[in-house]
């Protein structure tokens, strides 16, 4: 048997979170995080999986795939606005049928937000919902296009902000954490922020032995 790991980072291209059940969209062909969530349940028997999508664009594909499924919690923090892709992800979108309440959108209506804004959203909204849901696995749809300098996102997250969010997810009791790369259009910022996420995971692994 392979050694157990508490966290992992998947540096995959192309990204996946815009891919819907029946179609490619927004540079995405297959929804990597959604495939991972399905696999975790079907092959490894995990009961509850959460996807936390901090890519600056709404994870419409992931939301569509798990819209009616209450055993996969889909959380997305993203910009919304008249001219901002893809246009979905309003806070009123909360899931349907058996999935009602298992979709959580944090739509930002302005550009320029940074570490403190994301930390506050985590503290006040995202983490309480995640603690209540009690996932066995948290998949991060880890786009880095909300990083300072990204030409598409025009937000202001720094590597420290991504590390903070990673540590908060790693601290959730009973949950393994795997980050899957999504968007990121300033390569230096993407690299620096991905490194910060990896360092947070390595530090956590060292602390947990
Ligand atoms: Zn994006």
Image (tube, rainbow, N blue to C red):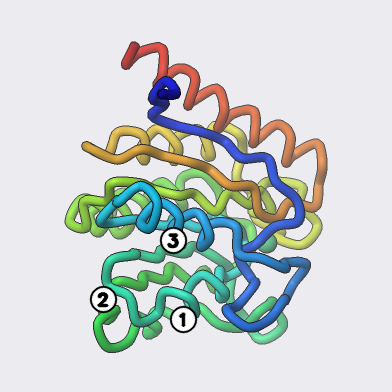
Residue assigned mark 1:
90
Q: Quadrant of ligand 1?
A: bottom right
Q: Quadrant of residue 2?
A: top left
Q: Of discs 2 and 1, which sits in the foreground?
A: 2
Q: Secondary structure at mark 2?
A: loop
Rendered location of residue 149, percent (x, y) = 76, 47
Residue shown at the point (74%, 34%) measured from the top left: 191
Which of pointers 1 and 3 lies earlier in the amino acid sequence? 3
Left-right relation of 131 to 30: left
Q: Name the residue at the left extreme.
A: 132
Q: How far apart are the two marked residues, 1 and 3, measured between alpha carbons?
A: 25 Å
Total marks drawn? 3
* Quadrant (top left/top right/bottom left/bottom right) for the N terminus: top left
Image height of 96 relative to 169, above or below? below
Mark nearer the viewer, 3 or 2: 3
Q: Is residue 54 left or right of residue 122?
A: right
In the image, the residue with mark 1 has its CB under 8 Å from the nearest atom of ligand 1: no
Q: Which residue corresponds to mark 2?
A: 101
Task: Estimate the x, y position of residue 138 in percent, counting from the top left.
Answer: 38, 48
Is residue 197 shown above or below 147?
A: above
Q: CA distance from mark 3 to mark 2?
A: 19 Å
Query: What separation in Å lies between label 2 and label 1 (alpha carbons)?
Result: 14 Å
Crowding at label 2, few (<14), some or many (≥20) Cα neighbours within 10 Å?
Answer: some
What residue sits 48% from the left and 76% below the top?
65
Tell me the residue at 51%/70% (across/down).
62
Q: In the drawing, does residue 195 fall left or right of residue 100?
A: right
Compared to residue 160, the image places residue 156 above or below, namely below
Q: Position of residue 53 (x, y in %)?
A: 50, 58
Q: Which residue is mark 3?
A: 38
Q: Quadrant of the C terminus?
A: top left
Looking at marks 2 and 1 on the same chain, the residue that comes earlier in the sequence is marked by: 1
Point out residue 119 in the picture as x, y percentages from the top left corner.
Answer: 41, 46
């Amino acid at each position: 048997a392979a050694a157990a790991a508490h966290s992992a980072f998947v540096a995959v291209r192309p990204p996946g979170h815009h891919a819907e059940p029946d179609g490619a969209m927004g540079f995405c062909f297959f929804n990597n995080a959604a495939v991972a969530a399905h696999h975790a349940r079907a092959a490894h028997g995990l009961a509850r999986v959460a996807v936390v999508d901090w890519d600056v664009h709404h994870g419409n594909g992931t939301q569509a795939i798990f819209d009616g499924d209450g055993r996969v919690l889909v959380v997305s923090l993203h910009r919304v606005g008249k001219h901002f892709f893809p246009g979905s992800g309003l806070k009123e979108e909360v899931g349907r049928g058996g999935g009602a309440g298992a979709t959580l959108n944090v739509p930002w209506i302005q550009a320029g937000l940074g570490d403190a804004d994301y930390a506050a959203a985590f503290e006040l909204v995202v983490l309480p919902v995640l603690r209540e849901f009690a996932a066995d696995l948290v998949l991060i749809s880890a786009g880095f296009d909300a990083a300072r300098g990204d030409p598409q996102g025009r937000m202001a997250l720094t590597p420290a902000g991504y590390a903070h969010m990673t540590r908060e997810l790693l601290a959730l009791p009973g949950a393994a954490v795997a980050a899957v790369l999504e968007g990121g259009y300033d390569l230096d910022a993407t690299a620096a922020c991905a490194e910060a996420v990896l360092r947070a995971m390595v530090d956590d692994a060292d602390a947990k032995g």
